[in-house]
Image (cartoon, grey):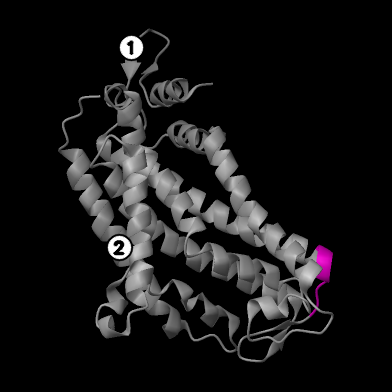
């Protein structure tokens, strides 16, 4: 099925329903069919499947590389890479650490930037808005799909990392950053919490991408802009002279997930990151709504 056909199918899923007597009935306020259609568009595209496969391949590359080159000595617990040889669990954390600055943001930027701009570029946005679905509802469904994508790719990297790590290096007690040891089961629960925290951070980036998507009809341009913004945030965050700006940067608190790997966990250390992500989500979703709600659709 082509992208245009997929967009048309999604529009049909959001359309009116015919009663037995032929009368039309307005669509429900929330349509699971519309949401499922959006997910099919995201996961059904070959280019997205290739990107997802690339994200999943990196943990394998890391694990195989360490296996082929690392000595037989046991690593310490303070560094994820040095700990891989003693416990394959750390492959997942090493992979998330490597992919967080570039690969995961690019993936989320591409999906969110395509949400509205992709419709306009294919000429299906105007048709989509002719069916009885409000712009607010359409925007909400698209952002929900972006959030699901962010969660799925984060979990994918973690799961592949754990599986290949345990296969090549085995498991055992997990040594936390604070030096304490916990069982592998508790370690997996903490890894799940790490994925949840990173998903919230990536959802903030997704909100920025969705807003950028409402500004243009060229999804590639929006993707590049959001990706450059992410890189710029990381660069600015490493300039000591701009310390006053750091707390307000989108990416500043992304590495705070390390707090979930300490004992005991200090929830107040995670609060700034969650508040920052929540603020970005609210601000840029509001901006996307304001832009998309009053936008003249010509394509």
Q: Nearer the viewer, residue 95 or 206?
A: 95
Residue 31 colored in magenta in the image: no
Quarter of the image for residue 298 reads top left
Q: Earlier in the sequence, mark 2 or mark 1?
A: 1
Query: Is 158 placed above or below 28 here?
Result: below
Any part of residue 147 in sight: no
Q: Which residue is labeled 2 in the image? A: 280
Which residue is at the front of the view, 110 or 35?
110
Per the image, label 1 sits on a secondary structure element best described as loop
- Segment colored magenta: 167-172
Q: Is residue 234 left or right of residue 195?
A: left
Q: Residue 23, labelled with which disc?
A: 1
Q: Are marks 2 and 1 in contact (CB under 8 Å)?
A: no
Taking the image as shown, residue 108 lies to the left or right of residue 195, namely left
* Quarter of the picture holding the C terminus: top left
Whether residue 187 is situated above or below residue 15 in the rendered picture: below
**Above or below, 94 relative to 135:** below
Q: Quadrant of the N terminus?
A: top right
């Amino acid at each position: 099925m082509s992208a245009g056909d997929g967009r048309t199918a999604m529009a049909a899923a959001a359309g009116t329903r015919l009663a037995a007597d032929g009368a039309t009935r307005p669509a429900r306020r929330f349509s699971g069919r519309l949401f499922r259609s959006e997910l099919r568009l995201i996961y059904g595209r070959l280019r997205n499947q290739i990107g997802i496969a690339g994200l999943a391949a990196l943990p394998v590359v890391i694990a195989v590389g360490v296996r082929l080159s690392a000595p037989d000595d046991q690593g310490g617990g303070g560094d994820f890479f040095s700990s891989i040889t003693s416990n394959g669990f750390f492959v997942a954390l090493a992979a998330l650490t490597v992919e967080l600055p570039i690969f995961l943001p690019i993936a989320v930027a591409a999906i969110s930037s395509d949400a509205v701009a992709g419709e306009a570029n294919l000429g299906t946005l105007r048709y989509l808005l002719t069916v009885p679905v409000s712009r607010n509802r359409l925007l909400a469904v698209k952002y929900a799909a972006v959030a699901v994508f962010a969660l799925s790719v984060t979990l994918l990297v973690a799961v592949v990392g754990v599986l290949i790590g345990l296969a090549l290096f085995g498991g055992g007690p997990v040594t936390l950053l604070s030096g304490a040891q916990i069982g592998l089961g508790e370690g997996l629960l903490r890894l799940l919490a790490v994925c949840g925290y990173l998903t919230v951070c990536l959802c903030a980036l997704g909100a920025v991408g969705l807003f950028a998507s409402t500004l243009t009809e060229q999804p590639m341009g929006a993707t590049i802009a959001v990706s450059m913004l992410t890189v710029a945030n990381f660069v600015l965050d490493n300039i000591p002279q701009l310390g006053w700006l750091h707390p307000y940067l989108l990416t500043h608190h992304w590495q705070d997930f390390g707090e979930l790997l300490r004992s005991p966990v200090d929830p107040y250390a995670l609060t700034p990151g969650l508040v920052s992500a929540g603020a970005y989500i609210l601000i840029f979703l509001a901006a996307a709504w304001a832009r998309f709600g009053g936008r003249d659709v010509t394509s």
